[in-house]
Amino acid sequence: MKKYALWALLLVAIILLFIIIVGVDEINLTEREEGDCKMKDSFQIFFDGQQIISDAILEYSTEYSTVEIPLLAMLRALGFELEWKNEFMVEIQQKEKRYSLDVTQKTLSEEFDDFNYLLMPPGDSYQPIFRTDKKEIYVDNRSIFYFLRKAGYILRVDLNEHVISIFSANPY
């Protein structure tokens, strides 16, 4: 009888060990999923060290290291001229360059050019942010990166400090 009790005790110990191991994996999986979710918080946006937008409540994702950017407010603060041609089309002008932002097609292209500056590189699994809220358009920092680079700006995002920094690529 004692022999069976020892075997039963050993079996219970093995089952408990199995439950503990599976439980730890489940806890780790949950932490990983929570760490990669989208969140909202207040961000500051700076241009060449000067604050241009304060306390913007923006959605961000730690999974892709992205944050949504209030595109039109940012472009105005950088000195771009914006004009709504209709409820779906915004004309953007930077000195002698003209761009068109089509809200329905989710495209941002230079005049006389079909290249969409909001496109992601081929094969990228990331789904870009593009949403409208009243008269503001939100895009993520990865989507707007190439447009800002072409326009002469460098974009840096610090998700830990909740800071978006834009620098003139050529400060002279």
Image: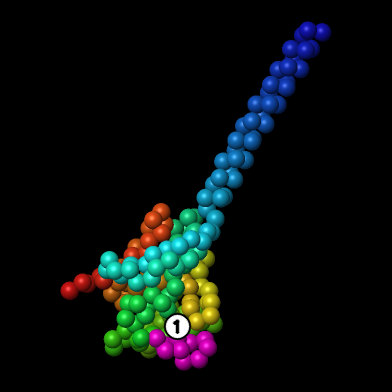
Task: Give left or right: position of 62 versus 153.
Answer: right
Q: Where residue 17 sits in the image (x, y, percent)?
A: 65, 26
**Residue topped by disc 1:** 101
Q: Residue furthest left?
A: 172
The answer, for residue 119, to whether it is visible in the render is no
Confirm whether the magenta stretch covers residue 94. Answer: no
Q: Which residues are magenta?
A: 82-91
Q: Where residue 64 sits in the image (x, y, percent)?
A: 47, 58
**Residue 17, placed above or below residue 132:** above
Q: Residue furthest right?
A: 1
Q: Nearer the viewer, residue 72 or 94?
A: 72
Secondary structure at numbered mark 1 = strand
The quarter in which the C terminus is drawn is bottom left
Q: Where residue 4 sits in the image (x, y, percent)?
A: 79, 12
Q: Nearer the viewer, residue 97 or 35?
A: 35
Residue at 52% over, 59% down: 39
The quarter in which the N terminus is drawn is top right
* Quarter assignment of residue 148: bottom left
**Residue 33, placed above or below residue 56:** above
Q: Where residue 141 sits in the image (x, y, percent)?
A: 42, 67
**Residue 54, placed above or below residue 151:** above
Residue at 44% over, 58% down: 65
